[in-house]
Amino acid sequence: MPQTQLEQKCEACRAGAPQVSDAELAELIRVIPDWTPVVIDGVLQLQRVYEFSNFAQAWAMCDRVAALAEEAGHHPALLLGWGRLQVNWWSHKIRGLHRLDFELAAKTDQLL
């Protein structure tokens, strides 16, 4: 059975996809300096908090990130609050970081 476009886009969504190595992490994090690698429940994730002057601006950014996630077929955790949006990218199936997470973090920054 041929893969759908969504399945082809999200290699990171398949069990067994490669996690980034420590050396790759050190290299890739330099490209997205406002993101922080964090471990949550034993899973390495990329996290960034965006600050806004009101709830509506934070909500609008949340909507843009959600649209990016749907387009990629790869979904972050989003925590929306007054004037703030926290975004965490990681690959659920591999319980860690894939190169796609770094690409999507960079694309998230471009949404500003």
Image: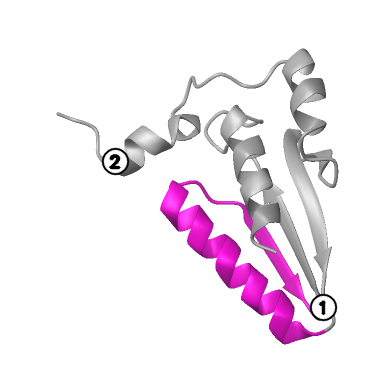
Residue pointed to by mark 1: 83
- Report the disc number at residue 40: none
How crowded pointer 1 is (Cα within 10 Å; few <14, some 14-19, many 20+) is rated as some
How crowded pointer 2 is (Cα within 10 Å; few <14, some 14-19, many 20+) is rated as few
Quadrant of the image containing the C terminus: bottom right
Outermost left residue: 1
* Quadrant hosting residue 30: top right
The kind of secondary structure the magenta stretch mainly shows is helix
Q: What span is colored magenta in the figure?
A: 54-81
> Distance between the Cα atoms at labels 1 and 2?
35 Å
User: Which residue: 46% across, 35% down?
Assistant: 13
Amino acid type, label 1: Gly
Q: Is residue 4 above or below residue 67?
A: above
Quadrant of the image containing the N terminus: top left
Q: Is residue 30 above or below residue 109?
A: above
Which is nearer the N-term, disc 1 or disc 2?
Answer: 2
User: Which residue: 70% across, 85% down?
Assistant: 56
